[in-house]
Amino acid sequence: MTALKVLVACEYSGVVRDAFRRRGHHAWSCDLLPGEGEFSRYHRQNDALEEIRGEHWDLLIAHPPCTYLCNSGVRWLHTRPERWEQMREGAGFFRQILESDVDHIAVENPVMHKYAKELIGADFEFTQSVQPWQFGHGEIKRTCLSLKGLPKLQPTNIVDGRAPKVHHASPGPDRWKVRSRTYEGIGEAMADQWGRFVVEAKRSIPKTAHAPIWSEFYE
């Protein structure tokens, strides 16, 4: 199997990174928080844009912060003026990730409000949205994906259950972490489907003196 160089940006949990690692890919996660998960030694506690621009990546999957971009929090823009600037920073960060010099990119976020979309780009719209119950988890939590050079994610295990469990998580300092974790079934689908797609895409590119060579990537 051809091993890909994969960066999972803004991920502390390691769910997506570990799914790719278990399939033999050279996957790394990065976040400002310490890493968790089975392969936490492959986590870089650093700014995502520095990691993205610092070296070649075959595939970039990113989970940028959504606090000031998501539709569920739009009402606070009209009661907390300081959030407008925070929203602008968040939208700019999202746009920079999406415009990164990587051939295959997936950027994940909840449903955005119109102000964030306008800042990202006049014609910006998500490629698709997925639900946990399409991937083996009987829950509701709509996740939107912006894709560049990748196919839409296909459901793998549609199950019963339409409860918004993650939204009812107990209050506490770690509630946001529980709500931000990628569901394992979705992470496995990303590794299976996008991993295979990018491997095939790489194999179809004629080798040149300037083309990246996978064997040159070291742990």
Image: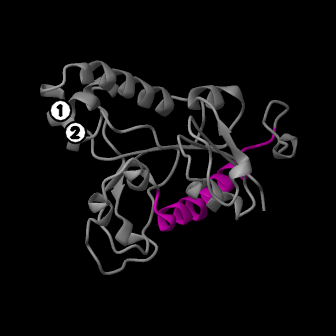
Determine which quarter of the picture holds residue 117.
top left
Circles 2 and 1, Cβ within 8 Å, touching? The answer is: yes
**Is 42 above or below relative to 169?**
above
Considering the numbered disc 1 on the image, is that residue within a helix, a strand or a loop? helix
Could you classify mark 1 by the number of other residues whose Cα lies within 10 Å: few (under 14), some (14-19), or many (20 or more)?
few
Amino acid type, mark 1: Trp
- What quarter of the picture does the C terminus occupy? top right
Asked if the magenta segment contains residue 59, the reply would be no
Counting from the top left corner in percent of width and height, residue 160 is at: 31, 81
**Is 125 above or below relative to 192?**
above
Q: Is the magenta stretch mostly helix, strand or loop?
A: helix
Q: Which mark is residue 76?
A: 1
Residue at the (27%, 46%) spot, across then down: 111
What sort of colour scheme is used for the picture? one colour
Amino acid type, mark 2: Gly
- What quarter of the picture does the N terminus occupy? bottom right
Considering the numbered disc 2 on the image, is that residue within a helix, a strand or a loop? helix
Image position of 110 (left or right of 78): right
Residue 204 visible within the image: no
Tell me the magenta residue range: 182-207
Residue at the (81%, 30%) spot, across then down: 210
Residue at the (76%, 54%) spot, across then down: 3
Image position of 169 (left or right of 213): left
Q: Nearer the viewer, residue 209 or 110?
A: 110
Counting from the top left corner in percent of width and height, residue 78 is at: 12, 26
Determine which quarter of the picture holds residue 81.
top left
**Residue under numbered circle 2:** 73
Counting from the top left corner in percent of width and height, residue 45 is at: 64, 36
**Is 22 above or below relative to 207?**
below
